Amino acid sequence: MKRRDLFRSIGITSLGLSTARGQRAPETAARATRGLPTPKIKDISVIEVQPAGTRLTVVKVMTDQDGLYGYGCATFTQRADLVKPAVEKYLKPLLVGRPADRIEDAWRMAYDSSYWKNGPVLNNAISGVEEALWDIKGRQAGLPVYQLVGGKVREAAECFASIRGDARTIVARTKELHSQGFRKFRIAAGGPDGEGSREAAVKILHDRALLDRETYFRSTLKLFEDVSRDLPEGLTLATDVHSRLAGHQAVEFCKRCEKFPIFFIEDPLAPEDLGYFKQIRDQCTTPIAMGELFNSPHEWQPLLEGRLIDYIRCHVSQTGGFTPARKIALLAENYGVMTAWHAPGDLSPIGHMANVTLDVVCYNFGIQEYGAFSPAVLEVFHGCAEMKDAYLWVSEKPGWGIEIDEKAAAKYPFNDNARGQRQGLNGGWTDERLPDGTVVAQ
């Protein structure tokens, strides 16, 4: 064979292969698309369960594909009875029949549909649906949610432990927990259960909780001083002020805390008093965490832009779910603010898994709140995030990796008289007042 004929035969063969490959590529792509058909939302239901005092609300979204469904956390403990009708009467008619794979579109439509926005009832209802759609997408893809948003940047999430008691009890418990791997501890005076667990400055008189702010101020600083004296080196502390102090007191309190080994002071101010955060930042370096009560971007955005806090501590379902929480984390990263998502017992294990998912995919993770789930909760929710040596590990199963035993859930209906439902206030706090009778934020 002549060289020219040889080259011609090679060229023809190569062209033939290229053409064949070009013809096969669209067919392959079509087969892949057909393998993951777009599911439609067929039905939406609400599971209300109270296995351990706290009323948990979970939304279940079913699709038109057999066996494909998802769960999302919509737990709003303080007004739990309002979430179910918000889902069933407003979001369900809006979303049934629509694609289940357009999560951002569904979230935005639900968010804008009420015209008046950023309320805790609607935000939690939207969160239940939105997190369920992420669960569906993960189940359909056969991947955990963290893989759908770029994968891990860390292996697991470090947690802090919460301890109540006098200084001696707290120090002993920190040493015990330190042997289990914990390095950070949120502390408060009081006993382990009921109203006795409230700070020492809060007393229950005549069916009202009376708060002496000056006593709270002094006793909490004294607790820090006593615990710090015997704290093993390298361990750090926090406390939740729960916005009990007036603005000027909060500024002074944070200044006084600067000398202690603090990893954050939580909620030193109410959301109504955000202007005082600049005074705190201007006068001390004490780390501040804020955000548990936030509903709206207009609340957290100024604090992030001004670098006025060190940890953003939003309750994920309160902000509307996984999607908006991830946007909060990305915004916070630009300003050097770390995450510390609010956690049990004010959310379900599904919400907790959403927290841990955010922890492992967001570069600016700071610390995760942790509370062990009771045996009753674990009876209902299978596949909860696993704790190992003070670190929480995200599920490797598709979606959130959690299944609900609905028969077990039926054993634990909402109960207004259950422990934790204070004074019949639908899960609300007590009517807390100053000694002169003035209502205070809590």
Image: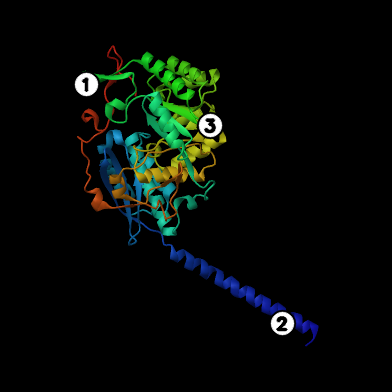
Of the two numbered discs 2 and 1 on the same chain, state the one appearing first in sequence: 2
Residue 423 locus on image (x, y percent): 22, 28
User: Which colour style is shown?
Assistant: rainbow
Residue 54 locus on image (x, y percent): 28, 38
Of the two numbered discs 1 and 3 on the same chain, state the one appearing first in sequence: 1
Looking at the image, residue 264 sits to the left or right of residue 46; the answer is: right
Q: Which residue was labeled with disc 3? A: 234
Q: In front here: 52 or 358?
A: 52
Residue 413 seen: yes
Q: Which residue was labeled with disc 2? A: 9
SS type, badge 3: loop
Q: Amino acid at mark 3?
A: Gly
Q: Amino acid at mark 1?
A: Asp
- What whole-number distance in Å separates the C-alpha atoms at marks 1 and 3? 42 Å
Position of 291 relative to 48 (above/below): above
- The outermost residue toward the right is 3
Kindly indicate whether the residue at mark 3 contacts the one at mark 1 (C-beta within 8 angstroms): no
Disc number at residue 207? 1
Kindly indicate whether the residue at mark 2 contacts the one at mark 3 (C-beta within 8 angstroms): no
Q: Nearer the viewer, mark 1 or mark 3?
A: 3
Of the two numbered discs 3 and 2 on the same chain, state the one appearing first in sequence: 2
Residue at point 63%, 76% (across, down)? 17
Looking at the image, residue 165 sits to the left or right of residue 257; the answer is: left
Looking at the image, residue 374 sits to the left or right of residue 267; the answer is: left
